[in-house]
Amino acid sequence: MRLFLVGAVAACLTVLFVGAVSASTPGTDVKLTHDANDGGYVSAYTLATGNPYTDDTLDECSISRGRQNEPAIAVDPRNTDVILGSSNDYCGVYNRGAAAGAVGPIWLGYYRSEDSGHSFVSSLVPGYPDDQSPYRSLSQARTASAGDPVIAWDAQGRAFFGSESSDDPAGSLKTFGDVFVARYVNSGGGTINDGKRYAGTTIVARGSSAPSLLGKFNDKTAIEADHNTDGRCDNNVYFAYSRFTGNRGGVGIYFSRSTNHGATFTHPYKVSQTISDVQFPDIAVTGNSNLYLVFRSFNSGRGPEQDSLYYVKSTDCGATFTRPRVLQNFIPNDAVDESSPEAAPRQSQADDSAGEEGADAGAARDCGDFADACTSGYTFFRRDTQPRATADQFDTAHPNWFYVVYDASKPGTEEDTGTTYGTEEPGVGSQAGIYFLRVNGATGGKFGPNLIDNEETGHQVFPDISADNPDSSSRGTLHAIWWDSRNDECYSVTRPIGNCADLTTVPSLDAWAAASSNYGTNWGSTRVSDVTTNPNYEQFDNRAVPFAGDYLYVSSVNDFAYGVWTDWRDTVQGTDPREDPEDEDGGTADVKQCRTQDTSGTWSGDQCPHDGGLDQNIYGDLAP
């Protein structure tokens, strides 16, 4: 969603660390989103029961070559053959045909592997507006769109998909702002069927159904389940999110828990207390079943907070939490520019439905064409410094240790950009690196922050971390993933990722990952993705601005780890006929689209959305 805060610069003390680097890749990249006649989408009902069912949305998803971003992944702790994935899945938006426009749902994907991630079957979580399967009645979802997927497993083969959801199925301007959890259970016949049968969706919190993101809107989700079977909080499900209050300003972190396998959740309560502007919660469950909830604050000027990481702690299975405690201050690396809108061409039909990405106003977090144009002339996707947290639920030797990664500016790399673009503030750019913290929640002591891979070239953004080691011989094993632009031929701290001095864009991002076998003291990293791709294709807001999502994901059990990322290798570049003359990016950020113009000068909508211009996908691979 288009919810944002821009923080100013905060000082931090950083300890640098150089990790080992390898050029090899763990395996062959695997596509999770089969929306191009390469397997197609299967109903969750058919997947679990074998009984046939389809609808217009599933049929469209099978041929759409549509957009998917913000992937999640979770390895079954009982059987590493079973891996579940998800994303914001736009595959169904043209489910009434190109002539009708993008009126279909953006929904939560459900991607399933039963061969350790070597292949996936693509599906959707039930409850989308077109769903008439027998599973539809099990869903409380009341919205036209859903996204921000997060996934967790418990110890009994149940999987939980958390989501924010919005937009009125009736087509009004209401943005409901609900958050929900969908649950899957074992369908019978051994652990290979863990998380296969859909069992229902529960709304955790409702938004205020106000128009245009005003009122109460819930977003930025996090989920975890207790699966260490120590008898304290077994199989509890924990859910956290950011609550935006559009008509009053400020953001809070809220928390809820389920003690009955996700069937119901407690009334959410605020854990960020008096902190004014916070986002990006993540949950870690430690070896003694304590909870640590980590989030970021913004130096917004509405309160005394700086750009910092905070955490709260629960020792009673999520019933209560301590007051927030500052974990680490940092220098942010938040892409920002000055909005400089240009006249948009008249169009008879919008290319995007209401739930897709729109334009910022004033300060811009992403830049493109027309209403999304910025003074600098660059084209780039949005990104902010954000934390991710994890713990080893089976580590009884260090029962209060948890681990945090975040992407922040590296001190000493600051340069004047000479434009309105910046990462620390407009006009000031810096290099983004991935920092690691090991925290003892019992004492507040910490190791770090240290750079996982102190590469001199390129930005490192959107990190994630995983640690679950039921096998004691794997104790201390951690896995991290991030996006890395060291292969960006136009890299400069003064420009956005993938932008050249002449304002054209180039392939610039790879997924990189790292592993540590000694609790994060040392790391070895490697490139994971096989193809460097261009994240700056203008596929959103009527083909005017790029959107890469807000995160990557990695999940692990012992030494087995699997990572996922958004990828543009299948996108078909093209020409936007509405640009006359061609704009600053020289066509390098434009995607294939087909339009006609009538005698009044009004353009049609895109008449060939299946031809590859929107072909953004989720790929995954084994991680070190």
Image (cartoon, rainbow, N blue to C red):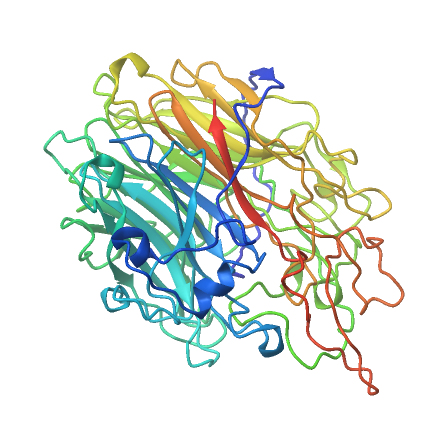
Query: In this view, which residue lies farthest toward the bottom?
Result: 600
Query: In this view, which residue lies farthest toward the left?
Result: 231
Nearer to us in this view, 511 or 332: 511
* Residue found at x 69% / y 23%: 456
Percent position of residue 192, x then y? 26, 36
* Residue found at x 70% / y 63%: 544
- Can residue 118 be seen from the camera position used here? yes
Nearer to us in this view, 313 or 90: 90
Percent position of residue 217, x then y? 40, 65
* Residue found at x 53% / y 72%: 354
* Residue found at x 49% / y 17%: 523
Left-right relation of 621 to 224? right
Percent position of residue 443, x then y? 28, 24
- Can residue 253 be seen from the camera position used here? no
* Location of residue 539 with respect to 213 vertically, above or below: above
Nearer to us in this view, 563 or 122: 122
Number of labels in the image equals 0
Where is residue 500, by image quadrant? top right
Percent position of residue 171, x then y? 47, 80
Nearer to us in this view, 606 or 397: 606
Where is residue 487, by image quadrant? top right
